[in-house]
């Protein structure tokens, strides 16, 4: 069977620093007809379960700890019996949403997660949050960036637990070094490529957060 990446769009609220913002999120399913991993379980566990269908969920991977990327993690895990994984540097953000219910596993830079005959490589890319990660699928020439990189620039860093110089360093050293043809599937909005975004790094630095 051929591995593929499916997209589920969900809608809800991003909440931080006393502000609530309506958002649409991209949830990504990486796998084949037998098994998948779910990336960034946002807002609507039922919609995600419907997209999974009869497939086995090997893991629920969270690119970072903002509520709009993890708020469906617990109900989803309960329905599909899969471990929830996030980087430990985002533990404070995780706890703000899920209280004392800890993730099942802490992701680490360099982790390799196998699914449907391919490998997902965890790249630690802090800045948008302290423990933000991107998920690189070299065999599919694809990277799932959460809120680290969008079409048109990096994720926001004007809120608690974020840092613009750190994010720029993550982009420079970890993401924009990937092959230009690498497809970038983002946490919100349309996809892009590394080759499309990389030439604009200096503009982003000049623009600031």
Image: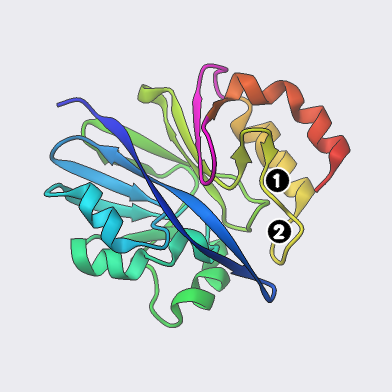
Q: Secondary structure at mark 2?
A: loop
Q: CA distance from mark 1 to mark 2?
A: 8 Å
Q: Quadrant for residue 158, please give it.
A: bottom right
The answer to whether 200 is drawn above or below residue 121 in the figure is above
Please state if 180 lies on the left or on the right of 51 as rendered.
right
Residue lying furthest bottom in this view?
A: 100
The answer to whether 24 is drawn above or below residue 151 in the figure is below
**Between 12 and 73, which is closer to the camera in this rendering?**
12
> Where's residue 5, x and y in %?
33, 34
Q: Secondary structure at mark 1?
A: helix
Q: Quadrant of the N terminus?
A: top left
In the rendered image, which residue does mark 1 sit on?
167
Name the mark on residue 89.
Answer: none
Residue 38 among those drawn in magenta: no
Q: Quadrant for residue 120, please give it.
A: top left
Q: Residue at x 49, y 25 (%)?
A: 183
**Between 36 and 100, which is closer to the camera in this rendering?**
36
Name the mark on residue 162.
Answer: 2
> Where's residue 179, x and y in %?
54, 18
User: Is any part of residue 87 visible from this angle?
Assistant: no
Please state if 135 lies on the left or on the right of 114 as rendered.
right
Please state if 123 lies on the left or on the right of 206 as rendered.
left
**Disc on the earlier residue, 1 or 2:** 2
Q: Residue at x 63, y 28 (%)?
A: 176
Q: Residue at x 15, y 47 (%)?
A: 55
Q: Which residues are magenta?
A: 178-191
Q: Quadrant for residue 89, please give it.
A: bottom right
């Amino acid at each position: 069977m051929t591995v593929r990446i499916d997209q589920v769009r969900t809608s809800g609220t991003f909440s931080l620093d006393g502000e609530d913002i309506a958002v649409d999120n991209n949830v990504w399913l990486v796998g084949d007809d037998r098994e998948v991993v779910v990336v960034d379980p946002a807002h609507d566990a039922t919609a995600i379960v419907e997209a999974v269908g009869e497939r086995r969920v090997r893991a629920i991977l969270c690119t970072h700890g903002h509520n709009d990327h993890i708020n469906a993690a617990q109900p989803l895990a309960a329905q599909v019996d899969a471990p929830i994984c996030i980087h430990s540097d985002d533990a404070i953000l995780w706890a703000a949403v899920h209280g004392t219910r800890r993730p099942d596993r802490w992701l680490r830079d360099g982790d390799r997660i196998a699914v449907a005959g391919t490998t997902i490589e965890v790249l630690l890319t802090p800045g948008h949050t302290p423990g933000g990660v991107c998920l690189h699928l070299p065999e599919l020439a694809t990277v799932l960036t959460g809120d680290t990189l969008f079409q048109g620039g990096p994720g926001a860093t004007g809120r608690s637990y974020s840092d613009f110089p750190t994010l720029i360093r993550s982009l420079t050293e970890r993401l924009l070094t990937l092959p230009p043809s690498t497809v970038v599937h983002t946490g919100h909005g349309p996809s892009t490529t590394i080759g499309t975004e990389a030439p604009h790094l200096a503009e982003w630095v000049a623009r600031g957060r």
